[in-house]
Amino acid sequence: MLTRMTEPDWEMVLEVFRAARSRRGDKGRDDRRFLEALHYFTVHNITWRALPAEFGWWNSVWKRFWRL
């Protein structure tokens, strides 16, 4: 994707992310794809609706971000 992070970097980030997330509600299906979507959203300064389809439905990404 876009971040240029190595696999060991991703393993560490995802481990911390999983430890910090809520224990209630839907946990999401793909943490890495979610974090990539957030990265894309902030780097490209777009609206949620403009997220590419590769990140999933924009509203699902937004809801997960809002809950976070």
Image (cartoon, rainbow, N blue to C red):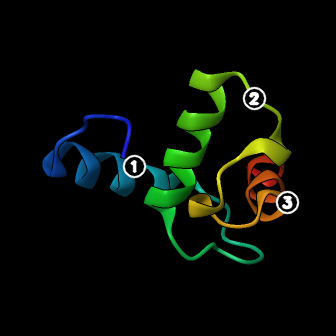
Q: What crowding class fits label 1: few (fewer than 14 Cα within 10 Å), some (14-19), or many (20 or more)?
A: few
N-term mark: 3 or 2: 2
Direction from residue 38 to residue 30 in the image, left or right: left
Q: How many marks?
A: 3
Q: Residue at x 79, y 65 (%)?
A: 60
Quote the CA–CA distance across marks 3 and 1: 24 Å
Report the disc number at residue 36.
Answer: none
Quote the CA–CA distance across marks 3 and 2: 14 Å
What's the residue type where badge 1 is placed? Val
Residue 25 visible in this rendered orientation of the protein: yes
**Residue 40, above or below 26:** above
Residue 22, image x, y percentages: 67, 62
Direction from residue 66 to residue 5 in the image, left or right: left
Residue 11, image x, y percentages: 24, 55
Question: Pointer 3 and pointer 1: residues touching (CB < 8 Å)?
Answer: no
Secondary element under disc 3, as helix, strand or loop, is helix
Quote the CA–CA distance across marks 1 and 2: 27 Å
**Residue 48, above or below 23:** above
Residue 27, image x, y percentages: 64, 74
Q: Residue at x 70, y 21 (%)?
A: 45
Residue 18 visible in this rendered orientation of the protein: no
Task: Depth check: give the residue in front, 11 or 32.
Answer: 32
Q: Residue at x 65, y 61 (%)?
A: 53
What's the residue type where badge 3 is placed? Asn
What's the residue type where badge 2 is placed? Ile
Q: What crowding class fits label 3: few (fewer than 14 Cα within 10 Å), some (14-19), or many (20 or more)?
A: few
Which residue in the structure is indicated by mark 2? 46
Which residue in the structure is indicated by mark 3? 59
Secondary element under disc 1, as helix, strand or loop, is helix
N-term mark: 3 or 1: 1
Which residue in the structure is indicated by mark 1? 16
Task: Depth check: give the residue in front, 66 or 33.
Answer: 33
